[in-house]
Amino acid sequence: MFSAPCAAAEEGAEADDPLSEEFFLEEDPRDPYEDINRSFWHLNYRYFDQYILRPTAVAYDFILPNVVQKRVYQFLLNLDEPVSFWNHILQWKWAGSFRSLGRFLVNSTLGIVGFFDVAESMGLERKHEDLAQTWGYWGVPNGPYLMVPALGAKVTRDVGAGAANIGLSLAVPILYFPFNYLQFWQVLSLAGLKNIHQRAVFIKTEALLESSLDPYVFVKEAYFQHLEYSLYDGEIPADEDLIEYEDMVHYFMEENLTQPISN
């Protein structure tokens, strides 16, 4: 797991460490708007998160038992399976498309509208795909890194895919089943609930973020590693210098979200 460099570090280790001070201070071509992004990071992290999102997540964690939290989150994940189905097809990942369809059918019936992940016990593991990943699969570059107010870390491909999703949901609503049967405020509420759950999970990793040399860079690198992990379906081309870091990123960005929260 990642830990911030310290003064007692072995002599010479920092020079070999991809997360050393030089790593953080080096100009990042992926982040040409860093000054603006850091301002929005401060707004998001020190104000929006501290005074709105985190207190809501703490209350959510305190009020709902772990088992209820997990059931609610599994229900929300199940709603995303039809979108994954279509995006698997758009990437010509036929096995993945049938797996997503199978997961939705099994969990919506035997799993009681998705509250239980029966499909996983049948060997149908979840692999989420969205439009941004589909664009990436077909070669659309990430584009500049953006820190969006209230929404957090994004790249321009994410923003473009989000806009395209809105247009497609209006033009071809069946692609977004079952969300096409919901009102806008209902969709927004479900998205908000998912974000609250994810933020509650991250409460136990806050010390990791706070102890990093530069929390802004930590989140940015975690985000880019998550993008790469998603694009390559978890089989990222090897980079020996970042193997330990990628393990941390996978834990921080992906695996934790499906686990119950420890009170």
Image (cartoon, grey):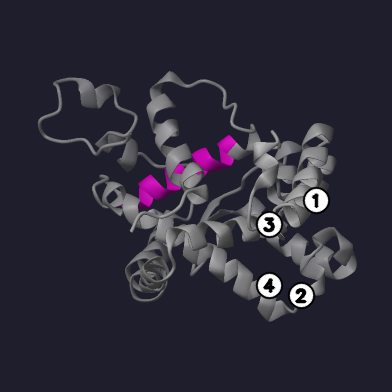
**Residue designated by label 1:** 105
Place residue 243 in its image quadrant: top left
Q: The residue tagged with tag 2: helix, strand or loop?
A: loop
From the viewer's perspective, is the residue at label 4 or at label 1 nearer? 1
The residues tagged by marks 2 and 1 sit, at their Cα atoms, a distance apart of 19 Å
- Residue 147, placed above or below residue 46: above
- Mark sitting earlier along the chain (2/1): 1
**Residue designated by label 4:** 187
- Residue 78, placed above or below residue 1: below
Q: The residue tagged with tag 4: helix, strand or loop?
A: helix
Work out whether residue 87 can be spotted. no
The kind of residue tagged 1 is Leu
Picture coordinates of residue 10 (x, y %)?
14, 22
- Mark sitting earlier along the chain (1/3): 1
**Disc 2 vs disc 1: Cβ atoms closer than 8 Å?**
no
Give the residue displayed 66% in from the left and 51% down from the top.
157
- Mark sitting earlier along the chain (4/1): 1
Q: Which residues are magenta?
A: 215-229
Q: Residues within 10 Å of mark 3 (few under 14, many from 20)?
A: many
The residues tagged by marks 2 and 4 sit, at their Cα atoms, a distance apart of 6 Å
The kind of residue tagged 2 is Leu
The kind of residue tagged 4 is Val
**Disc 3 vs disc 2: Cβ atoms closer than 8 Å?**
no
The residues tagged by marks 3 and 2 sit, at their Cα atoms, a distance apart of 17 Å
Q: Nearer the viewer, residue 210 or 29?
A: 210
Q: The residue tagged with tag 3: helix, strand or loop?
A: loop
- Mark sitting earlier along the chain (2/4): 2
**Disc 2 vs disc 4: Cβ atoms closer than 8 Å?**
yes
- Mark sitting earlier along the chain (3/2): 3
Give the residue displayed 64% in from the left and 33% down from the top.
233
